[in-house]
Amino acid sequence: MLNHIVIMGRLVRDPELRRTGSGVAVASFRVAVDRDFAPKDGGERKADFIDCVAWRQTGEFISKYFAKGRMIVVDGRLEMRDWTDKDGNKRTSAEIVVANAYFGDSKRDGDSGNSSYGGNAYGGNSYGGSSYSAPAPAPSYGGYSAPASAPASDFAMLEDDDAQLPF
């Protein structure tokens, strides 16, 4: 069986970081993903709004480095949840449980709202891209993946001078 999904889109709002009772970080966010085709009548392309959840270091990484409007590439698995609403009705929702997250644009592009980014469909570019991988063996899909054993404290803060950035 195979349950693997990769999407690329823009964050609809800032990620929401919470902690479980035992202190485990969990970030939830929604990604707007444009459909590949335009309507035959020449109207605007439609977008799908997909709920995502990221646990532990991946969730902390996303909540720290991504904000509303930023392009994000996530891969993980699709998970269906059954639940009961306050009126007692049975509901089903689908969400992506994120294994890896990648930058889909440069910070400069994300701030200006410019969606034209020279990277490939997985967020990598000729400089290697930037990403963080959850502690699980997974392919890198063209972007740089941090070692699975790297703790979140290995991130070094850069000065506000964008000339130091490799992209």
Image (tube, grey):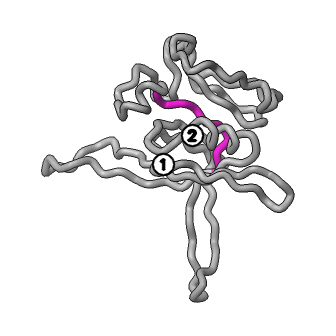
Which region shows up in magenta? 97-105
Instruction: Identify the element where label 2 is drawn.
Output: strand
Q: Nearer the viewer, residue 149 or 155?
A: 155
Could you tell me if the residues under marks 2 and 1 are in contact, i.e. CB atoms within 8 Å? yes
- Main SS class of the magenta portion in the image: strand
Which class describes the residues within 10 Å of circle 2: few (<14), some (14-19), or many (20+)? many
Instruction: Identify the element where label 1 is drawn.
Output: strand
In this rendering, the answer to whether 86 lies above or below 55 is below
Look at 50% across and 12% down and name the residue there: 126
In this rendering, the answer to whether 37 lies above or below 167 is below
Looking at this view, name the residue that lies furthest to the left: 41
Q: Amino acid at mark 1?
A: Val
In this rendering, the answer to whether 76 lies above or below 104 is below
Indicate yes or no whether the magenta region holds residue 88.
no
Q: Position of residue 36 (x, y in %)?
A: 33, 41
First of labels 2, 1 by sequence position: 1
Q: Position of residue 55 (x, y in %)?
A: 72, 48
> For residue 5, which quarter of the picture?
top right
Which class describes the residues within 10 Å of circle 1: few (<14), some (14-19), or many (20+)? many
Number of numbered discs overlaid on the protein picture: 2
Closest to the camera, between mark 2 and mark 1, is 1
Residue identifier under label 2: 74
Look at 64% across and 45% down and name the residue there: 98
Q: Is residue 21 left or right of residue 5?
A: right
Looking at this view, name the residue that lies furthest to the bottom: 87
- The residues bearing labels 2 and 1 have C-alpha atoms spaced at a distance of 9 Å
Q: Position of residue 65 (x, y in %)?
A: 60, 35
Look at 47% across and 38% down and name the residue there: 70
Look at 57% across and 85% down and name the residue there: 89
Q: Amino acid at mark 2?
A: Val
> For residue 102, which quarter of the picture?
top right
Residue identifier under label 1: 31
